[in-house]
Image (tube, coloured by chain):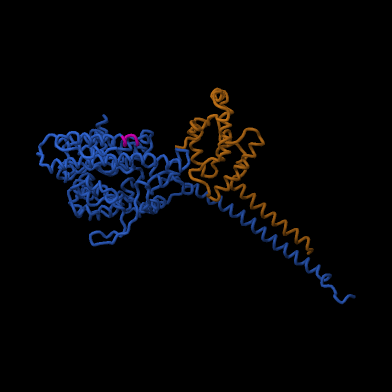
Chain colours: A blue, B orange
Amino acid sequence: MKPTETPSEAEPPQRRRLRSVGLFIGTVVAAAVVAVGGLALLMNVMERKEEGRNPFFRVVELTDDTEDPSIWGKNFPLQYDDYLKTSDQSRTRFGGSEALPKTPSEADPRSIVAQSRLEEDERLKRMWAGYAFSTDFREDRGHAYMLDDQTYTERQQVSKQPGTCLHCHASVYVAYRKAGDGDLIKGFEAMNQKTFADARKEVTHPVACIDCHDSETLALRITRPGFLEGIRALKAHQGIADYDVNRDATRQEMRSYVCAQCHVEYYFKGTEKRLVYPWANGVKVEEILAYYDEVKHKDWVHAETGAPALKAQHPEFELWSQGIHARSGVACADCHMPYKRVGAHKISDHHVRSPLLNVQKACQTCHHWPEEELKGRAVAIQDRTFRMRNLAMDALMDLVDDLSAARAAGVSTNDPSLLMGQDYQRKAQFYLDFIEAENSMGFHAPQESVRILGESIDFSRKGQNAMRTLVTPKSVAAVP
Amino acid sequence: MKASVIKGVLVGSTLGVALGVGAFTFGYAKGWSYLTNNPAACANCHIMNEQYDAWHKGSHRSVATCNDCHTPHSLIPKYLVKAENGFWHSFYFTTGLHPDPIQAREVSVRIAEKNCRRCHAEVVDQIDSRAVHGRELDCIRCHRDVGHPNR
């Protein structure tokens, strides 16, 4: 026997045992992995099948008086979750809002506001000289802020705002019916004549489910008297008598009309401050101006020049109507609330926002091009419009300079040349503001936008021309 | 009991369980239906509901089913493509890693394009005779609504 006797020869059975234990554990692990994989797949298939069943649970009863959107949200949690996201503040190149910190005060408890457009472009202040917009005008924020931003804007302090404003800054459907003892229009009339502060007490929420949806059928429904009457006047002008939008509009039309309840040009008519959409001659800018001229409406008298001026207000519906998307039957909701997939549900994205923040769903459903290409197209349109808007703004400033100079020189207020200059200012300014106040920087109707801005420049220069016997036209020599 | 018997039982039951779970999952997920030409099979997963619904409204519903446009026509390539697509479709649907709206891969677009040209050869030949070789027009660039107008 060798003394260094043989662990190696005693080992084989041990090692063999070890190996078979290893094999056993390995097999168990492999089998477990296969089982986990198989069952996970099975469960996934089951879940997907479950998704495909489209269950709907009516957990609360909704009525025509259910104003609080969180109650609707119990039946429609997917839509409600998205609706809450309109509090996001994200920028696009020409729209959207930055969240700027602000020290809350007694008069204005907001701790965050959007950037001031007046600081971005001083010319706006001058365009609106003498009007409340020259004191405070900020980039729009999402729907979630519509009520607060209107309640706390400095415009409230420099001028007496009527209750009419709430027509589009709050969920008013229930409040109107309450104020009118069940009659929507009567309530509307009553609220218009209150002060903003008094009327503000009657409302609680920014735009809510009930403003666009019937509580029983969930179908889209128009609740805003301004639009009910405005679209009726527009259709009458187009030869359709007795138009009732809730009876006569198609579903696809309604997917724009519910937005057009508020995203439109308007004015407050008479001492009763009735909200009117000026569409009796049509919705093109010249048709709206013709209407204002006919009814001799002015929003204010320009502080520097004495011109009877008009302020255009976010005419998104009007401009969109002139564009290729409207012509192709594409509704507001198709791009601003595109369909999205949640499980097997196909729902409208209730996070209403700029399509530029959601190109994939908003654009690529129809336009099969890469995202960067589509964004590039939109930005090219907006850059061109912005360039024209700046030219129009400069031209308007020149006209305002000339008018101020003429007034300073003591030209009679009845001087026909001065009056002509003032009228051209009214026109130039309204046309310019029609694109400036519109929230797409030309995208909703690109050619129409540059046409309007081109005409605005023309009006400003014609105005200067009309007064060339009174003053030396400003900056004519400076044009390169 | 002999070790080899235990081993046999263990391995056998492992394989059996895997096979059973696999077979059940296959059956539960209607795996067999993917071997057919029935368009309903393509909408087994709800992700294709829109395309399936739209196909019913499309101009080609009475002359072409999903496979007529989306798979090659000879037997072996057809099932190879079905297998490859089947794998990726399951993978993306299970993991949810797909773009939305869903997009066709380059290879799938080419298959569909070939199928347009197969049925419409006569018309297409006349158009192509004018084209520079290699730069023929894509049919679906203009006619993309014929299969399932998703708008």
In the rendered picture of this protein, how many numbered marks are placed on residues? 0
Name the residue furthest right. A1
Instruction: State whether residue A255 appears in this view.
Output: yes
**Image quadrant in which you'd find residue A466:** top left
Residue A442 highlighted magenta (yes or no): no
Give the percent coordinates (x, y) of residue A389. 30, 40
Give the percent coordinates (x, y) of residue B8. 75, 58
The answer to which of A7 and A280 lies nearer the viewer is A7
Name the residue furthest bottom. A3
The answer to which of A397 and A24 lies nearer the viewer is A397
Give the percent coordinates (x, y) of residue B150. 47, 37
**Chain part drawn in magenta:** A446-450
The answer to which of B112 and A62 lies nearer the viewer is B112
Depicted B125 relative to depicted B24: above or below:
above
Position of A351 compared to A24: left or right? left
**Image quadrant in which you'd find residue A419:** top left
Instruction: State whether residue A277 appears in this view.
Output: no
Q: Quadrant of the N terminus of chain A?
A: bottom right
Helix, strand or loop: magenta stretch: helix
Q: Quadrant of the C terminus of chain A?
A: top left
Give the percent coordinates (x, y) of residue B94. 55, 50
Depicted B14 relative to depicted B86: above or below:
below
